[in-house]
Amino acid sequence: MKKIIFSLLFASFAFLAVSGQSGTKLTVGMNAPEWSFPDADKNEFTMNSWPGKVLQVNYVDPDESDLNDPFNDAIDKAVDIDKRISRDHFKGFGIVDTKSTWKPNGLIRLIAGNKAKKYDTTILFDYKGVLQDIWGMPKDSYSVVILDKNRVCRAVYSGKIPDSEHEKIIQLIIELTKE
């Protein structure tokens, strides 16, 4: 009888441990689970805030905020200078992973405001690490996710994106905007 009770208790704790873990990791081909995050003015945004657009989501630990500036500069050039990517069909923006840093929220908003101005974009704030749970985004990192118009994940990059990948990602975005 003690063995049965012990086994049931062990199974219950094991189930709770597994069910309490993070959600599924977002991978290529998956529909991206929806979210809602505020900007610095406390306006709420979701992926549906940009209907019909291909999305480039930069999920950024503030301690890594400059890591992919060369990549974002290449995207910015493809949009604003070369006009290879149309703003009518594409939106790149940032989501700050405030849970992964020691920096105070006021400083984070200042850093984010400078990035928003530099890239003429929207910066949102994930105060609770929601995308770590529902998308499986890594902590203390810089991740870039490309979603098509139907919010299907087409690419996921974590860490620094090598210069050799920039044009490949730009071409992917161009193709997705034509679908």
Image (cartoon, rainbow, N blue to C red):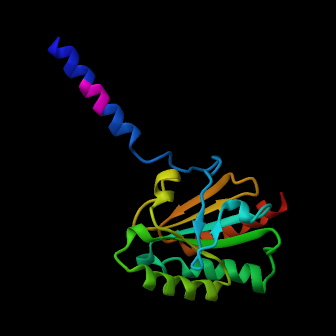
Please report the residue visible at 45 percent of the width from the left and 61 percent of the height from the top. 129
Residue closest to the eye, 170 or 100:
100
Q: Quadrant of residue 147?
A: bottom right
Magenta residue check for 54? no
Residue reaching furthest to the left: 2
Magenta residue check for 12? yes
- Horizontal placement of 21 versus 14: left or right? right
Residue 20: % across, % down: 38, 43
Please report the residue visible at 54 percent of the width from the left and 62 percent of the height from the top. 157
Residue 111: % across, % down: 49, 85
Q: Which residues are magenta?
A: 9-13
- Horizontal placement of 99 versus 165: left or right? left
Please report the residue visible at 63 percent of the width from the left and 72 percent of the height from the top. 43
Residue 139: % across, % down: 41, 63
User: Which quarter of the figure is the N terminus placed in?
Assistant: top left
User: Which quarter of the figure is the C terminus placed in?
Assistant: bottom right
Residue reaching furthest to the top: 1
Residue closest to the eye, 83 or 165:
83
